[in-house]
Image: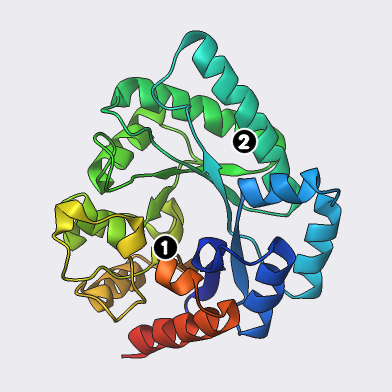
Amino acid sequence: MAQFELGLNTSTIRPASLMDKIRIAAETGYTAIELWNNDLSEYEEQGGSLSDVKKALDDNGLSVPTVIALHGWLNTTGEEHKKAIEDAKIKMAQAAAVGSTYIISSPPREVADLKLGGENYRELLELGREFGVKPAMEFLGFVDGVNQVKHAWEVMEVADHPDSTIVLDPFHIYRGGGEIEDMEGIPGNKIAVFHFNDAPAVPERAEQSDADRVYPGDGILDLKKMISILKDADYAGVISLELFNPTYWEEDPEKVARIGLEKMKSVLQT
């Protein structure tokens, strides 16, 4: 387990305030935290500053592997694409301000042109160098296009950029109809973050949504095999608990964070 840093994606305790999320992550034993751009924007709109957020992170000893997320960039051209790039600049600036290493770059819901996506991803990566933040390519199991590891990897291959990385996620691998073995052969230094979660037996795979995610070990996925693959790849980054389960949102966020960390450690230790 010492190979990995354990993180909390703040979607797991979404109803809590930004500063409470930071406090809870630290007090319950995490050393990393994934933040969301919408939380950062809301905090600024309410009169807060990102320098205060950075101080809170530093005071609590939390690293920020990723901020989430860039949208609208992959499958667009012309004015629509220009708007997506301007939005990306704002979000990258936020990510840089809180000391994030990566900013997650999400695919569209529709079927996508992966060649165009790769060219646009390269543009994002070059833009990221200006801000000191690396865009990380994400696949989403419930979208129509980039829903498997191989699709995200194709975008990365087209981009052909040294800063390219992928976001891996058990739920999305399962939901997109992929296989655990799809993770094999990916170098550890090409993985930006490993999101940790599990999927239940019901509803059927193709009917599941983010809301169906459960704690690691409470579902049917072979998480131990995934961890073994990560170890073989020499991945030494963050494993981050990422849940969107509304049942957990109704519970005490500190309790959810503690249980989540215990269940993560249980899977990693066995």
Residue depicted at x 61% and y 84%: 29
Label 1 crowd bin: few (<14), some (14–19), many (20+), radius 10 Å: many
Comes first in the chain, label 1 or label 2: 2
Q: Can the viewer see residue 1 in this picture?
A: no
Residue under circle 2?
128
Residue 218 circle label: none
Q: Quadrant of residue 181?
A: bottom left
Q: Point out residue 141 in the picture as x, y percentages from the top left corner.
A: 27, 48
* Residue furthest front as drawn: 250
Q: Point out residue 8 in the picture as x, y percentages from the top left corner.
A: 54, 70
The front one of 120 and 140 is: 140
Q: CA distance from mark 1 to mark 2?
A: 21 Å
Residue 194 circle label: 1
Q: Point out residue 177 in the picture as x, y percentages from the top left corner.
A: 15, 51
Question: Taking 236 as reference, is 182 above or below it?
Answer: above
Question: Taking 23 as reference, is 267 above or below it?
Answer: below
Secondary element under disc 1, as helix, strand or loop, is strand
The front one of 261 and 100 is: 261
The front one of 212 and 113 is: 212
Residue depicted at x 55% and y 68%: 13
Q: Amino acid at mark 2?
A: Gly
Question: Taking 83 as reference, is 150 above or below it?
Answer: below
Q: Can the viewer see residue 53 in this picture?
A: yes
Across the whole image, how many numbered discs are drawn on residues?
Answer: 2
Q: Amino acid at mark 1?
A: Phe
Secondary element under disc 2, as helix, strand or loop, is helix
Report whether 101 appears left or right of 214.
Answer: right
Residue depicted at x 81% and y 73%: 59
Residue depicted at x 32% and y 22%: 115
Label 2 crowd bin: few (<14), some (14–19), many (20+), radius 10 Å: many
Quadrant containing the N terminus in the rendered view = bottom left
Report whether 220 appears left or right of 91.
Answer: left
